[in-house]
Image (tube, rainbow, N blue to C red):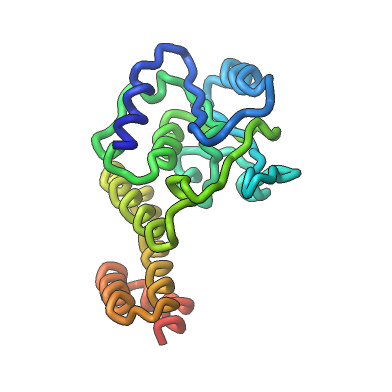
Amino acid sequence: GMLRNFIFPLNKCQGEYIAICEGDDYWIDPLKLQKQVVFLDNNPDFSSCFTDVKILKDGVVSDGGALREKHKKDSDKISVFYDLWIPTLTFVYRRASMLSFPEQFEKVKSGDIFLFYLAAQKGRIKYLDFISGVYRQHENGVWTGANTQSQINQTIVTLDYIKDYFKDNEKIKSIIQSKIANAKISMMKYYFTKKDKKEFLKYTAGLLLAHPKMLFDKKLYFFIK
């Protein structure tokens, strides 16, 4: 499976740092690794770092970076769970901060997100303000190649396993539970637009049973009404 094949080489790495670049992406800055390693060498309180990227889609590479200003920020063990986008191909982390992976890791659909959350528990994550690589969007990608329904399902499955791992941390568990609820609302909207009444009602009932407080969310209330 994909995640086991991801974990296997990571466990074989012997270097002080691990840099990830997935097969359909590529680096464009010849000093990328040097810049990131120098930063981590000089800042031991950070577990990892990342940069901005360009996007390659339909044969065209974007002129500027892909990250919005709100994503160009450092993260800690709690803030990492809020509004995060780290381009995986730019991520460099200390091997010592991740010598083993929890059993939930190989069961998720989005291992990179879980990896970022785990890294943040070992030290802050730094955003370095330069463009170091190109992220390729194409129809055969694991994420971009999936339809909306599959993407939302992948998100829910991943968050469920992450919540299970962090079950003893009430603050983090609450944040993840809210993210799961929002993903389920997205699924409700998807089935609504597809006029699939059966699935729409199933998700609506399940959401309100699991998250009754969300009934008082004005957006959700008016949407259901």
Determine the residue positioned at 53% across, 52% down. 83
Quarter placement of the N terminus: top left
Q: Residue furthest right?
A: 63
Residue 20, compared with residue 152, is above or below; it is above
Quarter placement of the C terminus: bottom left
Determine the residue positioned at 56% across, 46% down. 137
Tell me residue 183's x, y (percent): 40, 62
Determine the residue positioned at 61% across, 46% down. 71
Residue 70, compared with residue 12, is above or below; it is below
User: In the picture, residue 178 is in which quadrant?
Assistant: bottom left
Tell me residue 216's x, y (percent): 40, 78
Q: Nearer the viewer, residue 76 or 199?
A: 199
Q: Residue furthest front?
A: 59
Q: Nearer the viewer, residue 60 or 66?
A: 60
Q: Is residue 87 left or right of residue 193?
A: right
Residue 185, compared with residue 115, is above or below; it is below
Number of numbered labels in the structure image: 0
Tell me residue 45's x, y (percent): 52, 24
